[in-house]
Image (cartoon, grey):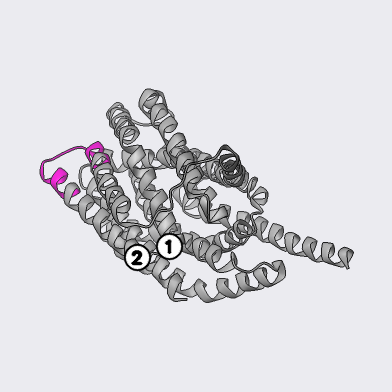
Amino acid sequence: MKQFLIFLFTGASIAILDLVDSAFGNQISLDSICVMSAFTVLYWCFSALCTVGEYAYRVKLKYESECFTLQVTITLICSFILIVFRVPLSHIYSLTDTQYDLLAMCLLCKGICLIFGKLETFFRTYIALSCQNKHIIISNIIFYSTMIVADAIVIALHGECYHLVITTGIADAITVIYYLIFCRFKWSKPTFKRLKECIKCARDIVIDRVLGKVATIGFNICASHLSTDMYALHSIGYAIATSLEECTNSCYTYQIIKLKIIYNLKDKYEMCKKISKQIFIPTVLVCYVIAILMVFPMKGIVSFKSALLITLLYNSQCILLQLYENHRGFLTSCEATECLRLGGLFGIFVRIPIAIISIVTPIGIYGFALGSGIDFFIRGLYYRHKSIQLVNNSNIIKVKVK
């Protein structure tokens, strides 16, 4: 439980400081609120692709060099796409001309800085799964202190929102230097056989993540058809709720570490259920406390009362997400990643219809507020079904062997 609390409060600190970063952007203008929301969701899709090495390591907990090589290769490809196709990518949204220009600049800056960001997340995952707790804390202090100071300078100099993307890249680069100097990383020459194995392991998780992010982009595109005021409210509530996925993601990471050493599937699943009960209340409490506190800096020029109500509704997903994260952790620890492949499709077939209905009916922003939570809950039910099916099948095989 101590290790989970370290993961949870690390996730909470990451969520808070990410939101502080967003809050700087929200102080610039209403255009910045809308642009940063559109940019963040679009970036998530590319980020999911770039994490192929990171997710391969989550499954295997070995082959560090091969996983690192995959992460770097895919990231460089995604950087090229972001830089070259930044203008057409920005026009998938319904924005003003000024917002289109700002979004294209944000994509250009992120394309240049992406390699530092994905190296940082790879090393962060590596040290978390290696339980190098001291380096987890120190690296977070380095990253966020650098980013916040740089953000404050941008705001003081009346910079634009894309300057904040550059400050994040600078913070990533400095943190990567720390990882390279001080963290224990087992480097060896990558082999083609292991690379293929890592790709196979990560493929299904990445497909799940990319499909989920495609659904998120579609969801946000639909939200951009709300009025500017309503889209600004959506951007605030959605930014807080999605940042707090760092907390619920702690459940996923903790399950992998605790379950990986249990080889009997029935015992593994019983432990998964036990852990899920232990971590449910702490996770929900932390998410709601942070959500309420972060409305103050995040609201910008928007009414506090309106922003608080929408944020509380959006944050209901932290309750529904845990079924999804815990069972995803169980399936990952079993290396049953093929069960995860179709999970992202639920996002497309659930989240986008909810968004469309919300636009064409009086439901409006309230449909968007509840849509993500409903999506994750349905995916969680699917993963639960696949987990039970996996355990039952293993019992049938044992009976046949006997």
- Ranked by sequence position, the earlier of labels 1 and 2 is 1
Q: Circles 1 and 2: CB distance less than 8 Å?
A: yes
Residue 298 versus residue 119: which sits nearer the camera? 119
Query: Which portion, as a residue range, is magenta?
Result: 151-165
Q: Of all residues shown, which one is farthest toward the left?
A: 157
Residue 383 versus residue 267: which sits nearer the camera? 267
Secondary structure state at the residue bearing disc 2:
helix
Q: Of all residues shown, which one is farthest toward the front?
A: 189
Residue shown at the point (58%, 47%) measured from the top left: 205
- Label 2: how many residues lie within 10 Å, few (<14), some (14-19) or many (20+)? some
Quarter of the image containing the C terminus?
Answer: bottom right
Secondary structure state at the residue bearing disc 1:
helix
Residue 318 versus residue 370: which sits nearer the camera? 318
Residue 367 versus residue 329: which sits nearer the camera? 329
When asked about the image quadrant of residue 304, the answer is bottom left
Give the percent coordinates (x, y) of residue 16.
Answer: 31, 60
Q: Which mark is residue 247?
A: 1
Disc 2 marks a residue whose amino acid type is Ile
Q: Which residue is mark 2?
A: 290
Magenta span includes 163: yes
